[in-house]
């Protein structure tokens, strides 16, 4: 007999977040001939930068190649925290103490800014500061996490503590983990609604934001920038590249220096069908967001209405359809929650995140040309904060760093030109190492 399908009849290969979410209005409008600042890329980073600039009275235009929010920013798992993933390196190379302290302090500042923006602009996006648990993948991971917890508490006020296996079992209805790390200053939200709220705030402040307009080329000319778009050419005093993992997707002639330091990696999610309420609650009784301590993590949470499990991971490092990634993710979900066998998948989707060789995001630039890039898989809070911080740099007309992430563009590598040819091998190696550590 054929195995029952894991797919619901109304299966859809788009983000579950888009159900019932009205995409931001983007009526056809003529582009201006001249603008003070052009922001390329309308994700969290580009919009947060535009919001701050427009609030300061700057003339700002944001253009995106795709529909507004179509990049990673409406596709994420919606988990938020203030620095838990900063500098997290699969090779586990530690950062110098002073650098680590500065990065974590600024990540915590970013979390404060994010919560402040939600309040100030009345952004309703189902945000709950539920806390988060990082499930201990292997017992030997506890040791490294003890010192990481100290750092996070000391520098980022993250309210981190180590959980025993029994304590973790009370948070996650699964025997999969060897314990956990509880992060108090964390939570989750509906990422598309957050995006819509941020965009509306930027527009209210005066920023013009349009999608479906790829920027094809940016040239320096007579102290200004000539911008070639798919619709028309315009001139701007400044350009901000906020293109993150999509930096080479729509034009190879835009942000070429950034592309050499950004490794685009696909990451995927699924949503289950509506579960019986008691079953859903038994999976995550405290409604926390969940991640893991291994290299190729799975992350999951309940939907804002508490009825579905939203489960994500880097399902594969090879090109794959949404159905195939759903099958792989479903396998991972059942390994953690065997009680979900037989429950079907209604949505499967993916998006691109930007990894960097130093595992850190970067902002910077000068002479009218700026960038914010390298979310490293965690950008709801971080890219909002860095877009805002970059705007502060622009407004201050300063070459001095405005935060610990302000420096040169993400470092490149001699063997890398922006095409991540090595990712299938590296990703598979990380998966192998994870499996090996768990067995050991
Ligand atoms: C499946 C998935 C799950 C995730 N889960 C989480 C999570 O739980 N928590 C978390 O913190 N982060 C998560 N992330 C990461 C997070 O979504 C990103 O870090 C964040 O959205 C990046 O925002 P951004 O503005 O830098 O980039 P994006 O939102 O990707 O925006 C970049 C934009 O640039 C545009 N662009 C590129 N080139 C051009 C051009 N030439 N002209 C015009 N426009 C251009 C693109 O169209 C794109 O819209 C997840 C990501 C994915 C894909």
Image: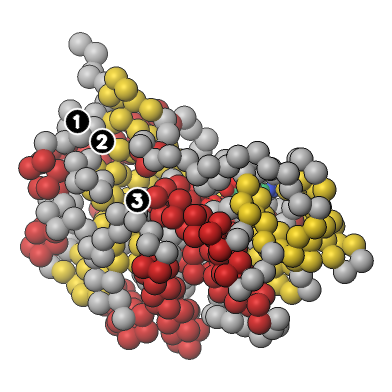
The crowding category of the residue bearing disc 2, from other C-alpha atoms within 10 Å (few below 14, some 14 to 19, many at least 20), is many
Mark nearest the camera among 2 and 3 is: 3
Query: Does label 2 or label 3 sit earlier along the sequence?
Result: 3
Q: Which mark is residue 343?
A: 1
Q: Is residue 107 above or below residue 418?
A: below
In the image shown, does 143 or 327 lie closer to the viewer? 327
Query: Residue placed farthest to the bottom in the image?
Result: 98
**Residue corresponding to mark 2:** 272
Q: Can residue 58 be seen from the camera position used here?
A: yes
The crowding category of the residue bearing disc 1, from other C-alpha atoms within 10 Å (few below 14, some 14 to 19, many at least 20), is some
In the image shown, does 402 or 98 lie closer to the viewer? 402
SS at mark 3 in the image: loop
The answer to whether residue 297 is left or right of residue 201 is left
Query: Residue placed farthest to the top in the image?
Result: 1
Name the quarter where the N terminus is drawn: top left
Indicate how the structure is coloured in the image.
Answer: secondary structure
SS at mark 2 in the image: strand
Give me the residue at 16% from left, 36% from top: 275
Residue 218 locus on image (x, y percent):
80, 55
Query: Does label 2 or label 1 sit earlier along the sequence?
Result: 2
In the image shown, does 150 or 439 lie closer to the viewer? 150
Query: Does label 1 or label 3 sit earlier along the sequence?
Result: 3
Give me the residue at 74% from left, 65% from top: 36
The answer to whether residue 179 is left or right of residue 109 is left
The answer to whether residue 427 is left or right of residue 334 is right
The answer to whether residue 137 is left or right of residue 166 is right
The yes-or-no answer for disc 2 within 8 Å of ligand 1 is no
- Whether tag 2 and tag 1 are in contact, CB under 8 A, the answer is yes
How far, Cα to Cα, is label 2 from label 1? 7 Å
**Residue corresponding to mark 3:** 190
């Amino acid at each position: 007999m054929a195995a029952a399908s894991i797919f619901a009849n109304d299966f859809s290969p788009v983000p579950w977040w888009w159900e019932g979410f009205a995409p931001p209005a983007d009526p056809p409008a003529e582009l201006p001939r001249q603008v003070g600042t052009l922001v390329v890329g309308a994700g969290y980073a580009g919009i947060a930068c535009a919001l701050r600039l427009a609030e300061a009275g700057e003339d700002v235009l944001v253009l995106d190649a795709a529909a507004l929010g179509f990049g990673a920013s409406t596709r994420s798992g919606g988990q938020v925290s203030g620095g838990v993933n900063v500098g997290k390196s699969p090779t586990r190379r530690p950062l110098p103490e002073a650098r680590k302290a500065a990065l974590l302090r600024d990540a915590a500042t970013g979390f404060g800014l994010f919560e402040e923006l939600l309040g100030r602009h009345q952004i309703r996006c189902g945000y709950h500061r539920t806390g988060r648990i990082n499930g201990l993948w292997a017992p030997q991971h506890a040791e490294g996490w003890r010192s990481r917890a100290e750092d996070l508490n000391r520098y980022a006020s993250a309210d981190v503590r180590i959980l025993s296996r029994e304590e973790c079992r009370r948070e996650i209805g699964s025997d999969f983990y060897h314990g956990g790390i509880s992060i108090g200053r964390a939570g989750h939200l509906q990422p598309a609604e957050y995006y819509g709220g941020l965009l509306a705030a930027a527009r209210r402040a005066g920023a013009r934001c349009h999608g479906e307009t790829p920027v094809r080329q940016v040239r320096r000319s007579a102290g200004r920038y000539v911008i070639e778009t798919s619709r028309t050419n315009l001139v701007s005093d400044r350009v901000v590249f906020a293109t993150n993992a999509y930096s080479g997707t729509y034009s190879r002639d835009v942000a070429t220096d950034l592309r050499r330091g950004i490794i685009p990696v696909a990451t995927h999610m699924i949503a289950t069908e509506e579960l019986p309420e008691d079953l859903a609650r038994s999976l995550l009784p405290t409604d926390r967001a969940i991640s893991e301590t291994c290299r190729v993590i799975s992350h999951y949470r309940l939907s804002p209405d508490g009825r579905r499990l939203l489960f994500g991971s880097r399902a594969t490092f090879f090109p794959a359809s949404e159905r195939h990634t759903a099958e792989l993710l479903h396998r991972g979900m059942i390994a953690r929650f065997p009680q979900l066998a037989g429950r079907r998948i209604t949505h499967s989707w993916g998006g691109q995140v930007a990894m960097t060789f130093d595992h850190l995001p970067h902002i910077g630039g000068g002479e009218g040309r700026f960038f914010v890039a390298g979310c490293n898989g965690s950008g709801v809070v971080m890219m909002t904060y860095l877009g805002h911080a970059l705007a502060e740099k622009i407004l201050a007309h300063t070459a001095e760093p405005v935060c610990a992430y302000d420096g040169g563009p993400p470092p490149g590598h001699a063997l890398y030109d922006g095409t991540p040819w090595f990712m299938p091998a590296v990703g598979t190696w990380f998966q192998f190492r994870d499996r090996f550590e768990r067995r050991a």
